[in-house]
Amino acid sequence: MSESSNDYACAAGAQDFTATAYRNSKGERWVTVEGTCSCNTEGFELTLELAPPPIVPVPEELHLTLVEHAPDGRVPQVITATPVKEDFRIGDEEERVVIRNRHITVPIKKE
């Protein structure tokens, strides 16, 4: 896992994420984006959320934001591997996931 930067409590890099496309029973295309980040304490919860569209649309990219939810109260100060996993509906044109606030790009594996 990569070093933490930009004052994030959880470090993440492209090598920490995968994106795998699949089709549901209705034929809709979805992608499962999952990864493991290295957080500076126990108790963090991580989510992936849709990011606002870029100024210049890029149909081949799904833009996301990695959001850290800090633990309440006192927690041990120990580096902790913290998983994150979300599913997003995508079109046939998407080829990669961009986690914009971390400058991470992950290719979407074909279903």
Image (cartoon, helix red, strand yellow):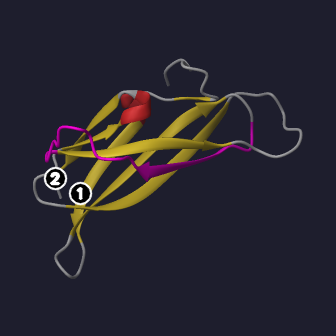
Determine whether label 2 and label 1 are within 8 Å by CB: yes
SS category of the residue bearing label 2: loop
Residue type pointed to by label 1: Ala
Q: Mark 1 points at which residue?
A: 21
Q: Is the magenta stretch mostly helix, strand or loop?
A: loop
Residue at (54%, 35%) from the top-left corner? Answer: 37
The residue furthest bottom is 26
Residue 52 painted magenta: yes
Residue at (20%, 82%) from the top-left corner? Answer: 26
Q: How far apart are marks 2 and 1 (CA)?
A: 6 Å
User: Residue 56 appears in which quarter of the rendering?
Assistant: top left
Residue at (38%, 46%) from the top-left corner? Answer: 51
> Label 1: how many residues lie within 10 Å, few (<14), some (14-19) or many (20+)?
many
Mark seen at residue 54: none
Residue at (18%, 59%) from the top-left corner? Answer: 111
> Label 2: how many residues lie within 10 Å, few (<14), some (14-19) or many (20+)?
few
Tally of numbered discs: 2
Question: Percent from the top left, x then y, of residue 92?
Answer: 11, 59
